Image: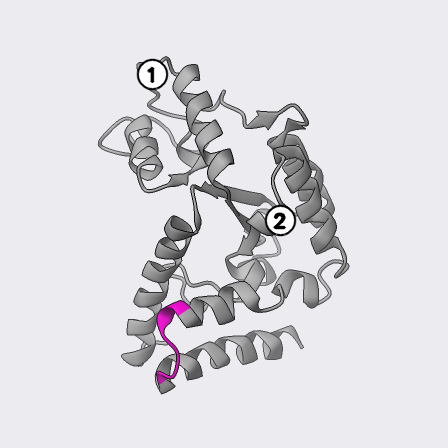
Amino acid sequence: MLEYIYSMHFDNLKDDILTQKLSNEQLFQKHFVDKETYFFSTGHVERNLEYTFKKDIAEVLEIHINDIYIVGSGKTGYSIKPKNEGGRFDRKFELKKLKRNKSDIDIAIVDTKLFDKVQENIYDWSRGFKITWVENIYYNEGKFPVPINYKFLEYLGKGWYRPDFAPTDFQIQTQKGELQNILNKWSQIFDRKIAFAIYKNWHFFKKYQLETIDLLEAKIKNGEL
């Protein structure tokens, strides 16, 4: 059943790309924003948990629930990341049966005030970015030809807070608590990792998604997918 749903969703996207009736921005809205979330609509967990999950995140961050989007294969049922385009949600786990191979639940948080506050906090934490970090819990020293904080600042300039480039000791928190505590709670409920990114506004969020859709579109039109 899940194989059928996955195929249906991916084939619908391919049809819309090949018929060229929708712009890529319309494709993004239809297939990656408006459609129901695959993870919550296919029996992996109770459907009504999507609202509670988002509500918990919105409350701790003191933002509106509509500023939280589920993205990635958990949203669509398939991946659009380069080198894994069309890969089905949890396919690697189904093959290897190892928990670490379960697909993540990826969320995008799009809120200008939150982004600005996080930027201010890490600026203060790093004493105006005078502190450098060459490794964190995601990457060892030498992974990149520059210190990791350079990669962090590169994406910050793109309106994107990437926690995998942030220093290990930096936590996002408000008077309501720490975001990571909420993510840990729901990671246990979903029995899989939850990853997040914060975007300054819709412009930066949309631009990143459209860049990935452009790459996917080229492969589909070339018959590679």
What amino acid is found at the position of numbered circle 2 in the picture? Lys
Q: Is mark 1 on a helix, strand or loop?
A: loop
Q: Which residue is drawn at 39% across and 16% down?
A: 126
- Which of the two discs, 1 and 2, labels the residue nearer the N terminus? 2
Residue closest to the eye, 23 or 126: 23
The stretch in magenta equals 20-25
Marks 1 and 2 sit apart, C-alpha to C-alpha, by 39 Å
What amino acid is found at the position of numbered circle 1 in the picture? Gly
Seen from this angle, which residue lies furthest bottom? 19
Residue 122's place in the image compared with 42, above or below, is above
Task: Please give the residue where the numbered disc 1 appears in the rendered image.
Answer: 128
Q: In this view, does 161 lie to the left or right of 67?
A: left
Residue 225's place in the image compared with 36, above or below, is below
Any part of residue 64 in sight: yes
Seen from this angle, which residue lies furthest left? 145
Q: Which of the 4 image quarters holds residue 171?
A: top right
Q: Which residue is drawn at 36% across and 70% down?
A: 24
Task: Please give the residue where the numbered disc 2 appears in the rendered image.
Answer: 99
Q: Main secondary structure of the magenta part?
A: loop
Q: In this view, does 95 lie to the left or right of 158?
A: right
Provide residue 182's location: percent of width, then percent of height.
67, 36
Q: Residues within 10 Å of mark 2 (few under 14, many from 20)?
A: few
Q: Which residue is drawn at 37% across and 29% down?
A: 140
Q: What element carries label 2?
A: helix
The quadrant of the rendering that contains the N terminus is bottom right
The quadrant of the rendering that contains the C terminus is bottom left
Provide residue 217's location: percent of width, then percent of height.
33, 72
Q: Residues within 10 Å of mark 1 (few under 14, many from 20)?
A: few
Provide residue 65's location: percent of width, then percent of height.
64, 48
